[in-house]
Image: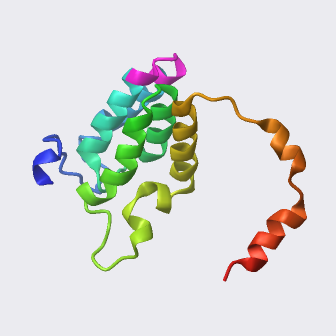
């Protein structure tokens, strides 16, 4: 697993005078600017660079943008792979922690929605929205009562 990690790493410091903060901010603004211009694939690559350099700490908070950029750049398989690999590759899962935290799509609601949406978009079928008219509250609450 360590051989798969990127070889980019920054020695982060919590000090305000650390000279690397301006570079991280510049890369983060560049990523956001690319995404705002519709260049989502390039923004995804910059996001991956930021994450590779700063995880597990992620001071730029780039991780929440990863799922959005994967969806917008139509990298559906990559999104599923990142959701599975990032926690274990970067030591975000503590020993003895519940298995629900071993995947980003089980720990973060945004990733859960994005991975499900990616699977749906990859299938390429149009949703049957007429089925929503047939669901009532009683159907939903009945299922909740039956669950242990």
Number of marks in the image?
Answer: 0
Residue 40 among those drawn in magenta: yes
Predominant SS of the magenta segment: helix
**Residue 46 appears at what percent x and percent y?**
33, 29
Nearer the observer, 98 or 129: 129
**Residue 64 appears at what percent x and percent y?**
48, 46
Q: Is residue 101 left or right of residue 129?
A: left
The colour scheme applied to this rendered structure is: rainbow
Note whether residue 26 is visible: no
Q: Quadrant of residue 9?
A: top left
Residue 114 among those drawn in magenta: no
**Residue 119 appears at what percent x and percent y?**
52, 40
Nearer the observer, 35 or 97: 97
Q: Is residue 135 left or right of residue 98?
A: right
Q: Residue at image x 28%, y 55%?
A: 15
- The magenta stretch is 34-41
**Residue 45 appears at what percent x and percent y?**
33, 28
């Amino acid at each position: 697993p360590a051989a798969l990690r990127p070889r980019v790493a920054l020695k982060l410091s919590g000090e305000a005078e650390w000279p690397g903060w301006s570079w991280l901010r510049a890369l983060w603004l560049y990523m956001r600017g690319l995404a705002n211009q519709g260049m989502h694939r390039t923004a995804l690559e910059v996001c991956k660079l930021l994450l590779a350099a700063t995880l597990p700490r992620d001071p730029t908070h780039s991780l929440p943008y990863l799922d959005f950029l994967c969806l917008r750049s139509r990298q559906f398989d990559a999104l599923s792979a990142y959701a599975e690999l990032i926690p274990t590759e970067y030591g975000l899962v503590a020993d003895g922690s519940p298995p629900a935290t071993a995947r980003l799509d089980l720990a973060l609601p945004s990733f859960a929605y994005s991975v499900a949406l990616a699977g749906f978009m990859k299938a390429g079928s149009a949703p049957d929205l007429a089925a929503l008219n047939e669901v009532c509250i009683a159907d939903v609450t009945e299922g909740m009562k039956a669950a242990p």
